[in-house]
Amino acid sequence: MWPLWSSGINNDGAAKAMSNDIPRIKYDVFVSFRGSDIRLGFLSHLSKAFHQKQIHAFVDDKLQRGDEISQSLLEAIEGSSISLIIFSEDYASSRWCLEELVKIVECREEYGQIVIPVFYNVDPTNVRHQKGSFETALAEHEKKYDLPIVRMWRRALKNSANLAGINSTNFRINLVQITDALLARPSNLGVKEDSRLIGIDKPIADLESLLRQESKDVRVIGIWGMHGIGKTTIVEELFNKQCFEYESCCFLAKVNEELERHGVICVKEKLISTLLTEDVKINTTNGLPNDILRRIGRMKIFIVLDDVNDYDQVEKLVGTLDWLGSGSRIIITARDRQILHNKVDDIYEIGSLSIDEAGELFCLNAFNQSHLGKEYWDYLLLSYWMVDYAKGVPLVLKVLGQLLRGKDKEVWKSQLDKLQKMPNKKVHDIMKPSYYDLDRKEKNIFLDIACFFNGLNLKVDYLNLLLRDHENDNSVAIGLERLKDKSLITISEDNTVSMHNIVQEMGREIAHEESSEDLGSRSRLSDADEIYEVLNNNKGTSAIRSISIDLSKIRKLKLGPRIFSKMSNLQFLDFHGKYNRDDMDFLPEGLEYLPSNIRYLRWKQCPLRSLPEKFSAKDLVILDLSDSCVQKLWDGMQNLVNLKEVRLYRCQFMEELPDFTKATNLEVLNLSHCGLSSVHSSIFSLKKLEKLEITYCFNLTRLTSDHIHLSSLRYLNLELCHGLKELSVTSENMIELNMRGSFGLKVLPSSFGRQSKLEILVIYFSTIQSLPSSIKDCTRLRCLDLRHCDFLQTIPELPPSLETLLANECRYLRTVLFPSTAVEQLKENRKKIEFWNCLCLDKHSLTAIELNVQINVMKFACQHFPAPELDFDDYNDYVVIHDLQSGYEECDSYQATYAYPGSTFPKWLEYKTTNDYVVIDLSSGQLSHQLGFIFCFIVPKDSKRDDKLILYITISDCEGEGEKGSTKMYMNKSDSTKSDHVCVMYDQRCSHYLNSMAKNMKRFKINVTAKTGPISFSCEEEEVLKGFGVSLINTSTYHNFIQQMKFFD
């Protein structure tokens, strides 16, 4: 849940949300120290250095301290911008120091206070992990104080020692380093009343990692992102945390603006003067005096150049970098990635805030608190809409929050309505410079995406075809990269292009400014009311390039047959949105004309029986007539060389397809829910067709072709084609084949095994009687779904690549074949095998299944001993999150499950019981500390009608200490078991948790309780198991098992 719903501040370190009661700053720095260790030398010199540098520090130099920390001292910590912790050998022996430390860590987490650890003649590792004198001191504390208190001290030591700090061996040198680092911090940083930094921890941690790379070379890091995304805020905080690690540092803000206003010499003087902490004058833009070069060359320095518009600006200020000292670092922020390309060592992109962070930042600005308090619950939905509108851009969240602060709900509603119609000027004025930097072609690409293509999930290669000026035009790809580099668009890993809605609105505003009065003279129309005005009054002109309208937003519209005749340059037409056909008098006389250069045509619920007779589809790239009345597209054969995608979804009156022979680049064809009884044979000659959707085509009886084995088809979906009786189409590149509910299909093609790249095969709820033996040649097959194949009697040998086999409810299944040798079975990696309610399985098959389960579960367990990215301390927190958000399905990634009919435990199972617990004895010490826990459950006949089970597992020490901990596993099963079933499971996270709890026990008890029902605890019902068992496994026992298998092979 995001913070708008919460009842309090999120106190984790990731979001430094400030409460309303931010302490007033009284001191620049608070010093925490152990007096007996450092008072005589270090402290006096440090105090003197603070005095000389005019640093107002709180140093409690009383010689005698009691056990209880005073309230005035706690207030001093809260009222300091920075806390300086001097860890010394005897620091942890003082409860006073540890209480100070807890308060300092608390202020860092709640108020963003800066914390600098100084390791005074101690190893930071000893502090972090409480070794040496720290271990001794804490052990003594555990004898005197409650364990939770000592744990709190340990946590504070670990957290603070993990921060970047100063190793102090020569205190005179480090005094200079400490004071210079404090003074180098920008004056606008630190804990102040408006310091409300949200969602910065991850980018700062990532950037700190880049800064700390073990290299003595000068490294340059580029940071880029769109306007308002928080680049400056993040780099300021980063500088604030890191500057004390360098001998000198300088933060230059608004570099582009400063250079334009003051010139290179002035800005360069500021940079050098700050680095040398003295007034320096230079007379030329080229180079620096040798004495300055020598002085700076001896120092490890840190420079931030914020808001750079051209890399020439960097070169003018810092030159070739070879004059900077070893280990120096430079950070450059820019809104244009191209500026940084091939110029810096690393480029880091600042992304938008998460929904939680965005909600918190909006609340801080709108309500002056980090959550939506009860007094503001009436604003809940409105707040959600505002946060959704901002899409995680901090600038937009701040502007909107401040704009609406203190306003009533009617003002909020009015503002939201305005935002949807007219963008916020303040936001757009900041972003427009990125647009004005583009050339003419790039501006056109930007406007086409903003006014038409954004939200259509098109890939780069599609846009290259749609937006190119001629066949050999490669400027679109270059332009898209340019827009990406300027953060005006994003290109995902799968090359899908998208645009932030704020940027989109700015683009639409620019298009609107082309002609505010004469709507027909605009190049791009995207406002429903304005398009209605143009179409209803026939105001279209040749200036119009694109029309995109949501038909649900307009009133009754009547179009004439030549409505598009004046729009000779129309290339992109999109009529979408649901509307009531009875309320819309579309084209009562039909349509006589569509421009011949249309490239994108989407017309949902199109009333036409076919496209205009003289329509030329030569430039068409995408055609989408879903939910239309169309019976045919056109007569004869057309030149369709540019056509990439055709969607005729739910065209129930579609009687025939045209000849697609010349659609040589067609990749996607969707004919789902059509009335077709056959498809044109030309489809199977297409060399680039990758995806064919023919679901719910009840009249389709055969899918056959002379081109029996295709080359390009990757996805074929024939779901619920009830009438399909004959299928001969296969493809050497097929990845997924779905034939769910194909009731008329009895057999698969004999050449099925030639589909060597097939990964997923779904034959769920079909009348398939047998599988071809060649299926074992599908060497990449991962998932085979045979559920409810009532007529299937035999499952042949399957390829070793298979991970999931679902054969539940196969009522007449008798035989399941496995490889004849153990060597072959040991190649398998099956983590889910289910035969729920397969009650006709013969004895030989059940025995073979039991052995196969043993092989696979042991192998899976040994491959998954460590818990994936989860400390066991966090396991129960994970369970809560998992229950609420993920559900059972997410268990698949770390869980192996095997089920088959039966009422007896497998012979190999080590501990078994018909009660609800087993006792495990490890006193012999035969197994290693890294154990896997394999469970087996006997699920009874007539199990409650629910397809989910939650298995609650508790572990307790048999030596009398009682319960130690509990966890849970999730099981998918048949919703009604018709006999007893054996279910063997290995859950990686559960096993890791139990192993962690049992590592110090010699004898322990494991108890299991099963419950059915949804994850909501209030709806669970207890399920009685017939018994359960556990086997412990480690690498050694698994290898012994393998040797036995090979021996008896």
Image: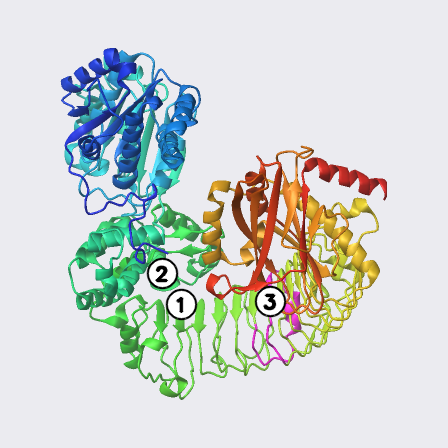
Is residue 953 among the parts visible in the rendering? yes
Q: Quadrant of the C terminus?
A: top right
Magenta stretch: includes residue 100: no
Q: How many marks?
A: 3
Looking at the rendered structure, the secondary structure element under dot 1 is strand
Q: Residue furthest right?
A: 1048
Q: Which residue is mark 3?
A: 692
- Marks 1, 3: nearer the viewer: 3
Give the magenta part as a residue range: 671-698
Does 81 appear above or below 416? above
Q: Which residue is mark 2?
A: 448
Q: Which one is in front, 637 or 660?
A: 660
For the point 80% across and 55% down, the residue is: 848
Rendered residue at 74%/46% (across/down): 827
Query: Which one is earlier in the sequence, the residue at label 2 or at label 3?
Result: 2
> Under tag 3, what secondary structure?
strand
Q: Quadrant of residue 345?
A: top left
Crowding at mark 3 (Cα within 10 Å: few <14, some 14-19, many 20+): some
SS at mark 2 in the image: helix
Q: Does the CB distance between marks 2 and 1 fall below 8 Å?
A: yes
Along the viewing direction, whichever of 631 and 277 lies nearer the viewer: 277
Going by the numbered disc 2, the residue's amino acid type is Asp
Q: Earlier in the sequence, mark 2 or mark 1?
A: 2
Q: CA distance from mark 2 to mark 3?
A: 29 Å
Foreground pick, 507 / 192: 192
What x and y, as percent, mark residue 715? Answer: 61, 62
Picture coordinates of residue 33, whole percent (x, y)? 27, 21
Under mark 1, the amino acid is Phe
Residue at 19% x, 47% y: name it: 20
